[in-house]
Amino acid sequence: MISKLPQPAGAVRQACSACFGRHTPMLSSASSAARRMLRPSATATAPMSTSAPIPTVPLAFDLHKPAKPVADRQTSPIIVMHGLFGSKKNNRSISKMLARDLGRHVFALDLRNHGESPHHGRHDYSAMAADVGDFIRQHGLKQPTLIGHSMGAKTAMAVALREPDLIADLVSVDNAPVDVRLESDFARYIQGMKKIDDAEVTRQADADKILEPYEKSLVIRQFLLGNLHRPESESATQKFRVPLDILGKALDHLGDFPVRDPSAARFTKPALFVRGTRSKYVPDEVIPVIGQFFPRFELVDVDSGHWVISENPEAFRQAVVKFLESKD
């Protein structure tokens, strides 16, 4: 989706005792001053509750099998989750690499209202976490590793805090357990995507022309247009498979995090936080908050923007493999 950047030459590991975890800054990292400051919202958010049942949906998935598995598919698999407007196909390459390197089965999920998973009027982190928890139980998975990017990262963190006994560890990619306001880009994308639906286009080139005023980057437009359903007939209308109205209404809350009090919900198992040095989603100011919820966390900086896995897949792969191999 995004061209691969050169891999950093190395890393220096240093103690981060004030943050309760370990920090591995990668070379060529951007200064913290270059990142917009993000702080936990002052607006109260109700703690996540497991008392009231949440309607869940069955999640579509791709299973990537290792050539030389170290265990069966139920034992210690890896579950990979995409971000907003993404799908399991975006994580195909990294899932195959992790299956190969670690000898573990990798499930790449479509979260609700994305890809081939069902649509539902509720789209928030408590609901997505409940979906993932049900997926783990329904497939009989034992102590999986959760890996999530952006929206998928907050979903993974919510699962860890909601049901800590259900998983072994987690990897959060360029997101943190804090409330932030989403960039206005996402609302603009939905406006452009609705224009495409209204135009009843039959060719992706026509859809791209409509979307161009809303996003100048061809790479991002191609990513968004990956959500178009392309019928077999060339004359048939192409429509977005994601429910634009539902996601549009959810935008105001997708920057939130459903857990406020780390004394009431804490994940004491290993957690890896990977952030892009040219991204602004995990600034230094929120690292202490990460440590309050995830006291055994490690932090690794990767030379990339927000799209860490796509922009620097090799550095990301190395960080995850090192983290998970050290837990064996």
Image: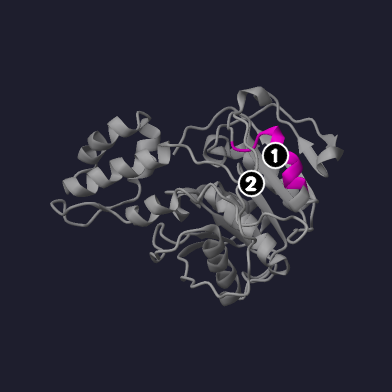
**On the rendered image, what quadrant is the N terminus found in?**
top left
Q: Residue at the location (40% across, 57% down)?
A: 115
Q: What is the image's colouring?
A: one colour
Residue 94 appears left or right of 171: left
Give the structural element (helix, strand or loop) at label 2: loop
Residue 76 appears left or right of 125: right
Measured in 3D between alpha carbons, the distance from the residue under mark 1 to the one under mark 2, in whole angstroms, is: 8 Å
| For the residues bearing labels 1 and 2, Cβ distance under 8 angstroms | yes
- Quarter holding residue 132: bottom right
Query: Percent x, y for residue 117?
Result: 41, 64
127 relative to 308, above or below: below
Magenta stretch: dominant SS?
helix
- Which segment did they paint magenta? 281-291
Query: Percent x, y for residue 169?
Result: 72, 58
> Residue pushed farthest front?
43
In the rendered structure, does residue 282 fall within the stretch colored magenta? yes
Binning the other alpha carbons within 10 Å of mark 1 as few (below 14), some (14 to 19) or many (20 upward) gives: some
**Residue at which label 2 appears:** 178
Q: Earlier in the sequence, mark 1 or mark 2?
A: 2
Q: Residue at the location (61% across, 62% down)?
A: 105
142 relative to 18, above or below: below
Q: Answer yes or no: is residue 201 visible.
A: no
78 relative to 224, above or below: below
Q: Answer yes or no: is residue 268 visible.
A: yes
Give the structural element (helix, strand or loop) at label 1: helix
**Residue at which label 1 appears:** 286
- Quarter holding residue 236: bottom left
- Quarter holding residue 203: top left
Q: Amino acid at mark 1?
A: Val
Q: Amino acid at mark 2?
A: Val
